[in-house]
Image (cartoon, grey):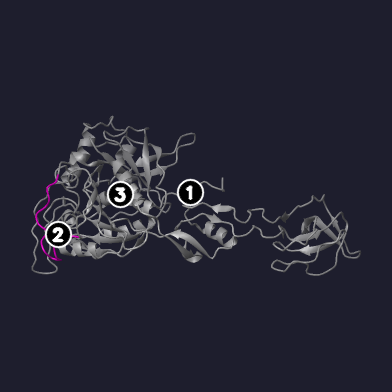
Amino acid sequence: MVGGSSYRPRPVSDSAPGSTRTTTSSSARDAPCDGRRPGASGAPADDHVAEADREPLPRPTGNHPEAGAEVGAEDEAGAETAEGAGTRGGPALPHASSPRGTPPTGTPLGPPPTRTPAAVSLPWERARAVAAREGRSGPAAVVRLPLDRALGHVLGEALGALTDLPSFDTSAMDGWAVAGPGPWAYEAGAGLLAGRRATAPLPDGTAVRIATGARVPPDTTAVIRSEHAHADEAKGLLHARRSVVTGQDIRPRGQECRSGEQLVPAGTVVTPAVLGLAAAAGYDALPAVSRPRVDILVLGDELLATGLPHDGLIRDALGPMLGPWLRALGAEVSGPVRLGDDAGALREAVVSTDADVIVTTGGTAAGPVDHVHRVLDGLDAQLLVDGVAVRPGHPMLLARLPGAGNRAGQLPGGPCLVGLPGNPLAAVAGLLTLAEPLLAGLAARPSQDAYRALVHADVPGHPHDTRLVPVVHRAGRPGGRDHVAPLRFNGPAMLRGIAAADGLAVVPPGGVRSGTEVEILDLPWAPATPWSEGCFT
């Protein structure tokens, strides 16, 4: 149930499994627009780009009519108004020592708890910092993974070279190994091939054919490339076509690294290149941080898993979206579990999980079937974030459940629960605000580096809260700077804008004018993974 502060009672028929709930176009879980990223090149079609990208708007402020209209539309959708979307008591609740809750499965959990005004919701930057700190609060679990399973994990320890690389002098080219000054006597034959054992030293004045990667005989002066040598078969002499420099085209032992030298620092994401380097250095398995395990619980009786919306029922957009998104953030994700609006089923799923993180969709407001807060109360969970001053996504939350960790590396006190609003774009805001920094901490990944980009349009802002607006990067004209353009269809219930986006602009209260730099959050599939500093620089 997405983030509306006030709720409207909606009749539910309990007489049949297929019973429907009355919904309207302003329902907190409206069906998202079906939009796909158009164009073979991945660039969005023009109708995705905000009108402001074509024609500058007046200076945006908190009282700007455009901003007011956009915020008003968001509130009208029942997603972001103040009442009922704030924190419960502001600071995190003290950690309780009692066992996890007492109500048995399927029993009512009592009336909604009292909610405090939305003014005490955490600022967006602080909420992200709280999630990141929580992710780093427990020790990372390091396991040894075979090379074929380590891709995408984070190294839990630095990789030191197990041998010199190369481990012996090798030929860098197909050609001739020669000793002393020329011309050199040689004997016909295949010569030295890669993978063969060491040979006797090469006497002065002699040469032998050698293949790339073959071990160079002791006392070799240089390797002459085949195209730079002339073999006089009649006399059995080899002549160089150009001057020969001692050591040329020989890869000396330890040229790349010496045994024990650090190759890759801890915290590096294992890429295909890291796998190749590790194999070359003699590794069969790598010390990797376990990926955090995530359970997805989809709430809402009005959601359909297949087919077209009908009779007040709408398609579940978050179930198909969240799993791949969370995997892109480095998590190991189980398939989504659809629970409907059943408080007992939600409680049972939460207490029986062995995951590190539980992600719920909907049910974070204060409506009659918004059970997340009541379940967390019954389990004596510690609310770390209960409402964030951001649009969309205001009623997101982060809690930590009590109880001993299920396995090494799990957060102290039990798993975390990230409560996402049910509106699709609001849920995306929750993913990037709370889930991304939390999972980065659990997996020992660095959170994405903040950077700023010019915005090529006026972007209206909320009077008090941060806005997250889908944008697409665009190359500047010759001599100009690259920039981002805000996209249309950025309402809390919409996915059409984010489907065409490669990032979210972090718009401060009051909005920004065209030509202003704004902070950008990359979507997880947009940036290339950077190498961390170390022996590569």
Amino acid type shown at disc 2:
Gly
Pick whichever, 318 or 215, lies toward us: 215
Q: Examine the rendering and report whether any part of residue 252 can be seen.
A: yes
Q: What stretch of residues is rendered in magenta? A: 100-115
* 8 sits to left or right of 295: left
Task: Assess disc 1: are there few (<14), some (14-19) or many (≥20) residues with their C-alpha within 10 Å of its C-alpha.
Answer: few
Task: Assess disc 3: are there few (<14), some (14-19) or many (≥20) residues with their C-alpha within 10 Å of its C-alpha.
Answer: many
Numbered tag placed on residue 38 in the rendering: none
Seen as rendered, the residue at the extreme front is: 97
Disc 2 from disc 3: Cα separation: 31 Å
Tell which tag, 2 or 3, sits nearer the viewer.
3
Tell which tag, 1 or 2, sits nearer the viewer.
1
Considering the numbered disc 1 on the image, is that residue within a helix, a strand or a loop? Answer: loop
Pick whichever, 106 or 492, lies toward us: 106
Which residue position holds label 1? Answer: 530
Q: Residue, x 32% and y 52% (percent of image)?
A: 435
Q: Earlier in the sequence, mark 1 or mark 2?
A: 2
Image label count: 3
Is residue 366 depicted above or below 193 in this figure?
Answer: above
Which residue position holds label 3? Answer: 434
User: Quick check: marks 2 and 3 in contact, CB under 8 Å?
Assistant: no
- Was residue 104 drawn as part of the magenta stretch in this picture? yes
Which residue position holds label 2? Answer: 312
Disc 1 from disc 2: Cα separation: 46 Å
Disc 1 from disc 3: Cα separation: 22 Å
